[in-house]
Amino acid sequence: MKYVFVILILFNVACSGSSLTGVADTNLTADQKTVIVNVLHEGSSTFDNDLGLTVTLSEASLDWGHVILISGGDDEECEEGHDVTLHVETEEDLLTPELTMLNLGTETINDYAYCGYRIELEGFHLAGSVFDGVTTTPFDITVEDEIAKEADFMASHEGVTIPHPLHYHEGQVEKEIAFVNEYSHWFDGIDFSESADELQVEIIANLKSHLGQYFSDAH
């Protein structure tokens, strides 16, 4: 079973020439840059969902695969034919302390503007139990299919979301793409009366709604 969904990556539209966290490769040529991909998560091992059920997680992980930067797009800066695949194959342990930044990869890319992206996840695993006030029910959910999501890079400007490419300014050698994952919301609206297939679909829909861009600088 394949699941495809779209999320927005949000940046501040006011571009800045300052470099971001990380160490630039001093051996870069003039047309090469560094991109850093990070992720952090928000949540805990025990929480109540929006239906009042208490969920306790004993295992929780998200498998990252690739982030593809797409050079084609409607913006005049973007030019077809320069897509680059970032290899971020990492298992994110969601039960490590929340807001812990995990580096998915640091890679060298060519100095082009990138209007869009495609994220390829390789699945997730969740195990634990749910308590409804009377009965505790165990669960073990594994999704191993590719989960792909594709969208334009976006920016927020005066409360309006607009397309805005990821690009480098003169003298800037590195950029960071960071994601935040609110995994405790993956169980919103779920009462565990669903079939196994329905449960997977609902969790993936919630994952889509609560995985997004975490940013502190512009692009």
Image (cartoon, grey):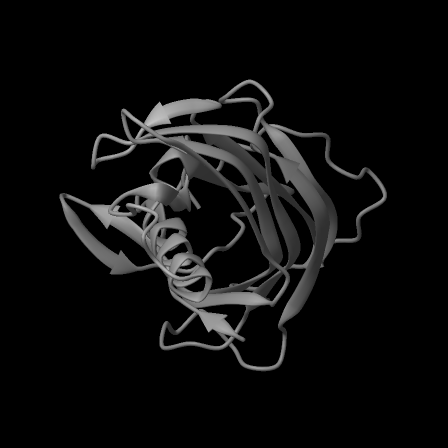
* Point 51% across, 30% down: residue: 57
Q: Is residue 174 left or right of residue 116?
A: right
* Point 61% across, 81% down: residue: 81
The residue at the far right in this view is 27
Residue 78, given in percent of the width and then of the height, sits at 47, 72
- Residue 215 shows in this picture: no
The residue at the far bottom in this view is 80
Q: Is residue 122 left or right of residue 170?
A: right
The residue at the far front in this view is 134
Vertical position of residue 145 compared to residue 155: above or below: below
Vertical position of residue 162 compared to residue 10: above or below: below
Q: Is residue 133 left or right of residue 3?
A: left
The residue at the far left in this view is 159
Quarter of the image with the N terminus is: bottom right
Looking at the rendered structure, the number of numbered marks drawn on it comes to 0
* Point 42% across, 76% down: residue: 73
Q: Is residue 108 left or right of residue 165?
A: right
Q: Relative to the observer, which residue lies in front, 31 or 21?
A: 21
Residue 154, given in percent of the width and then of the height, sits at 33, 56
* Point 38% across, 64% down: residue: 198
- Residue 119 shows in this picture: yes
Residue 173, given in percent of the width and then of the height, sits at 65, 42
| Quadrant in which residue 215 is drawn | top left
Residue 120, given in percent of the width and then of the height, sits at 59, 63
